[in-house]
Image (cartoon, rainbow, N blue to C red):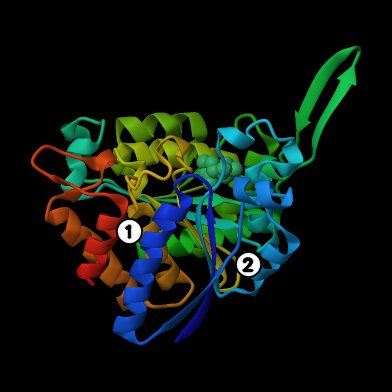
Amino acid sequence: MKKKITVLSGDGIGPEIVNEAIKVLNRIAVKYGHEFEYTYVDIGGCSIDKYGAPITEEGMKKCKEADSVLLGAVGGPKWDSCPANIRPEKALLAVRKELGLFANLRPTKLFSQLSSASPLKESVISNGIDLMIVRELTGGVYFGKKELKEVNGEEVATDIMPYSVHEIERIGRVAFESAMKRNKKLASVDKANVLETSRLWRKTMHRLAEEYPQVQYSDILVDNAAMQLIKNPTQFDVLVTENMFGDILSDEASMLTGSIGMMPSASLSDTTLGMYEPIHGSAPDIAGMNIANPIGTVMSAAMMLRYSFDMKDEADDIENAVNKVLDKGYRTGDIMQEGCIKKSTSEMGDLIVSEI
Ligand code: IPM
Ligand code: MN
């Protein structure tokens, strides 16, 4: 198969980790007779420096025309004081919105080889951690009306959190379908005791639940969900939630595995076009040092093959290769353990390639 991939390496460690994912994709292309064509587009701080905008119109067009998009990370202290409309993050939100990437899948899995990296007690994680967070990505407070005005000589800021039934329904369907493919267990996270959007969310989810009687469905309030994730994470399988709750809970959940550097994500639309990125940030403090962990990005490339290109064997191949490399005791600095062998970013990429 021939596929066009738009590559948004971004800032900080972005280019280094994306390089390794591309090495892996190239190996897959050779092994399975595919052709991957890459188009590089600047995004985030590097684009602000070059063009005065976090992404150009031309760049956005190249994302829309692709079969899928691979992203590293955006942002860094250098651009923290940029005005709100040209911040690096703005480009990320614009790509999500313009490509219609409403469904963000964040699988959170504890690699058995790294179980001692989890900050939780052995007794809490003895059954392993394997969650799927389904985060709504193009609605809610991220995209609602924002305002900063002066009232009685004092600044007042407002962020509106709108949700319509169709937005809730389509993310709900993704979550129920995901639950059907996994362990048929879904928890919907909301704040229905306070928020009107959450009450609509819950009502809509309940209606969907009737269509999926095989799925064991429950509601959970977001504050309780945050607590339960630490207290007893293995009670969950698929979690579905709105944009900002999902942002917060997915960072929390990733830490249960002790290694945010390992976690991939997929942002999906209602076509096969998707964007794939590690959930960690641009780590400016270690940029350019060839020490970042590329596994989150490599695993994101695997998700791209699985979800956008329907290449299941190829995706499995990458995931197995990562497991073999970990089994052999190779680690980047962030996941280094006693008795293991420390590897650089590019060495880690080469090792994964050699297992495919
Ligand atoms: C994420 C990030 C983004 C978000 C930021 C960079 C805008 O934290 O992908 O989780 O909040 O969605
Ligand atoms: Mn986040």
Which element type, helix, strand or loop, lies under badge 1? loop
Q: Residue at x 18, y 54 (%)?
A: 326
Between residues 136 and 251, which one lies in front from this camera angle?
251
Say which mark, if any, is on residue 63. Answer: 2
Specify the quadrant that holds the C terminus.
bottom left
Within the image, what quadrant is residue 322 found in? bottom left
- Label 1 Cα crowd, 10 Å radius (few <14 / some 14-19 / many 20+): few
Specify the quadrant that holds the N terminus.
bottom left
Q: How many marks on residues?
A: 2
Give x and y (percent) for residue 71: 51, 57
* Relative horizontal placement of residue 52, taking residue 257 as reference (left or right): right
Is residue 120 visible in the rendered image? The answer is: yes
Q: Quick check: is the Cβ at mark 1 less than 8 Å away from ligand 1?
A: no
Give x and y (percent) for residue 223: 49, 29
Q: Which amino acid does label 1 sit on?
A: Asn
Say which mark, if any, is on residue 183. Answer: 1
- In the rendered structure, which disc, 2 or 1, sits on the residue that comes first in sequence? 2
